[in-house]
Image: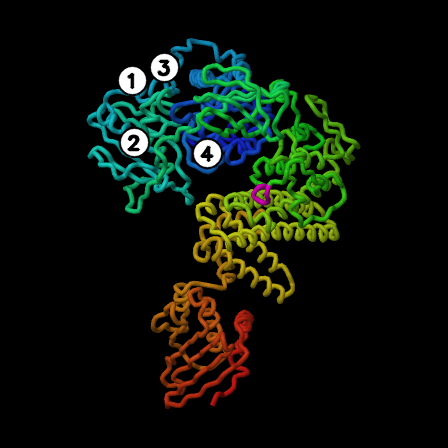
Amino acid sequence: MRDIDILNELREPGYEVALLSTYSIDLSFFEKTVLGTLLDNSCHHIGIFTDHGMLMENYQDGYKLSDLGRSYLVQHVPTTGAFHPKIYLLLGDKKAKVIVTSSNLTAAGMLKNAEVGNVFKIDEGNMASLSIIRATYDFFRTIYSRNQLRYMLHVLSEAEKFSYLSKGDFEDRNQEFPMFLSNVRQPIMDQLEALLPDDIKRIRVIAPYFDQQLMVMDRWLRNYPDVKVEFLLQNETSNFPLEKDQSSAIELKEFHFHAKQQPRYHGKVFHFEGEQKGYVVYGSANCSKQAMLSSAENGNMEAIMFEENSSNEFQSFLDEKVQVGPLSPDFKREEVEEEPVSNKCPVIFREAVYEEKLEVVLESSEEINAVFINKQEGQFVKQMGELYFFTWNSKPINTNIIFGITVMTEIGEFEVQGWYQDWDKLYLTFTQQIGKPYRKVQDDPELRDYQNVVDLLNDLYQRLVLDEEDMMKQREENTSTSTIHDNAELQDEDIEVSNNEDDYYDLSEEGHTEKYGVIKGKDVLSDLISALLSQYQLASGASNERITPKYTPKNNGNTGEPTIQLMNHVMKRMDRFRKKFLKGLTSPAYMEKVEAEVLIKNATIYAHFLMNFSSREISKIIQVYEETADFKKQLVLNKKLLKKKQETINDLLQIANAITRYGKKSTLSEKLLESNNIVPLLLASLLLQEKVIEEGDDMMDRRHSRKKISIALKEIHEHVAPIRYEYDRYLEQIVLYMAKLDYETKEKELRNRLEQLFDFHSLTHFKELIRENPNINFHGNLTNSEANLHIETELNLSGPFNMLQLTLLTSMLNVMEWSDKTQFTITFHNNKQDGSLNRLVLVYSKDKKSLETKYEYHNGNKMEYQKDYVTVPKLITAAERGNSEFMAKDFKLKY
């Protein structure tokens, strides 16, 4: 039981078969983050088993996929409750591994949530986990038999060629720890009670979901009379029934992660402590009747691991991750459905296969009269129980893999979603006859020196969540456009980046291809890589021959190293891609329609890509600079370095501005911002720009640019996140971001710079600034209702005193609570009784643009002076320049 990077585990080469099970599923995420690596690693038999309801729910969200039924298979498993196991099994000729976990095959499950699981591996030198590998494979065989997808048998048959799956006694292979258990035939709790000792004295549960009657707990209290049960809960993520009367044997506790950011806890862990030994259970099962007390026939289908685990080991596991304490008074439960909602539609899509003609299999509890796809009626073939078979002589669907099916029954008309398996393409996948340009690029020895560049490109496209449908409506079918996105990368000369969003997003049906690397109907990955390497003849199909260049690179004595021209060619393409993607991401049309989560995710991905890409380029320039002694070359390289930094910072600023604009019209949740860690990126972009300003020579330009940065900071504070007094927690990350662009700095320096750049503060902070000034004493109270200040100091009408007046006044103008005030008053009381001046009152009127000074003397005399045409910018500029004479010149006596 430990933390697992499941994505990295799935990317390990050496496996030929992948069998995956999950409850929630995001196939778009799977295709972009996992599938390509599996195929590249020669894992060509891939089967996914998932819950029917969750799969159909995702389809209704508008999935657009490129490889489903072509490069991998998905089988939904019919159950009474939920199909809930999370198992990831990889099988190869010489090794195998299985991950049993609580993580679903979604971005949240793989990247965001706190999950619990374990990895079990075997190879030629270590067969200790063989029983678990065999047990989990048997589990997949069992669930396959519940809804036999036609081509899934090819995947399972490929697995059975591995001899280790058939060796030994299958019945007794799982009788030692750790032990894999499922409720396919028998409830999990029944199996655990047969394995656990009778002297269980303490049970600790860390799980998010419970049945509201707490039937599992009741069973423990009956079976183990002296047991104490602890439930460790996370605030706002658990549906534990707090209102239910609790036994004295029950204790509720709350836990918090040690990390600054609190991920959502989704793990399911049970620890049973006996007199002599301890045991731990983890996997997919929550603490509910459906999960623990039911078999798959009348509840959920679940899978868990059962291991020996002492109390000290379990406590160490807890102490490392979380801090546990009493339930806080503000603890809130999450309102979620206790059990899965059953499918109300009497018609279920089972399978569709395309082999010369399309065959669709439906399951229905009501008699089916007719079936239509795109208004074309299918031909009835046969009925087997509740299964109905229909065929179409021609493929009546467009190029989208997911399509709608209209079903006419005796009780009405129903719409279901389906997809078809294309045997021709599956056959090419199974027989490893598919090819992808990126794989061939990786294998070409001529290209290894700029492999990092291509790796970056591939990584970005694998992870993109940019959704064109968020930017504009789907065009009519069969509309064809010629776009820069289609054509620009095929030209070697520079092309101006268009402001037309249509040039970046081609939603036409004709633009769709069905190769690996398709994102929303466009094979952008393959197209762009092919264009980047347009001077090479890329082989197709299953050929493993080395790619032959159209020309022979000049090696300059170093075999295998590409020329500078080739490198420049690649970098030019990458820069063009960067500009085009940023145009789309920050365009008004996209910002108008995109959801906040999609925008923030895209901005984060792009910003990190940009940082990494630019960091590598800057490092290369610096390396060349340090290796050359030619002064002229150093000047050229230094200019190139500054240009690269400024281009990167400009891109980051565009992202910051776009997010701020979005925040002005829509609220950005703190949870969304924190989970994507976008705020330190925004601050880093402004501080990087401030660094560049420092390197300039024009003082006026510096002042103007710093003012723009101050305004940007204020807008981020007001419309994105309240950063004014919370930026300290981001400083460590900002230092790392700035180092990527070769700006070494420290947190203390950043703190000082931010305080100078923030030209606004709260009333509370203003009070602190006054109290910190050793030359004045603060009198009275400051309120939100009036911008009045009373202080005691020495009134000597000198340059320093004039500067004090100016500084205090501009500070008052920047108090957020006084932003709507039009009059600001400061009363200076003389703390020197031997002076002639008793009091000076300074009054500034925004409306009149006037500044008044009133002098009151100990002898009772009074004098008033006024200065007109005094604007706020004039005051601030004078303060920034340290111009104390501003408070002494051009005043006129009022009377």
Residue 84 x, y percent position in the rendering: 41, 27
Protein image colouring: rainbow
Question: Which amino acid does the dot numbered 2 rest on?
Answer: Arg
Q: Name the residue under label 4.
A: 109
Is residue 839 left or right of 868 when viewed as pictured?
A: left
Residue found 47% across the figure and 90% down from its top: 895
The CA distance from mark 3 to mark 1 is 12 Å
Q: Indicate the secondary structure of the residue bearing disc 2.
A: strand
Decide whether residue 470 is among the magenta residues: yes
Q: Please state if 347 lies on the left or on the right of 695 as rendered.
A: left
Q: Is residue 225 magenta?
A: no
Residue matched to label 2: 204
- Decide if residue 178 is in sight here: no
Label 3 residue SS: loop
Report the magenta residues as a range.
468-473
Q: The N terminus appears in which quarter of the rendering?
A: top left
Q: Distance between the residues labelled 1 and 4?
A: 32 Å
Label 1's element?
helix
The amino acid marked with disc number 3 is Gln
Tell me which residue sits at (41%, 63%) in the image. Answer: 765
Image coordinates of residue 131 in percent, x first then y, are 42, 16
Q: Nearer the viewer, residue 719 or 380?
A: 380
Q: Earlier in the sequence, mark 3 or mark 4?
A: 4
- Residue 735 placement (x, y as % from top left): 52, 50
What's the distance in space between the residues labelled 3 and 4, CA to CA?
30 Å
Query: First in sequence: mark 1 or mark 4?
Result: 4
The crowding category of the residue bearing disc 1, from other C-alpha atoms within 10 Å (few below 14, some 14 to 19, many at least 20), is few
Looking at the rendered structure, the number of numbered marks drawn on it comes to 4
Residue 513, above or below 818:
above
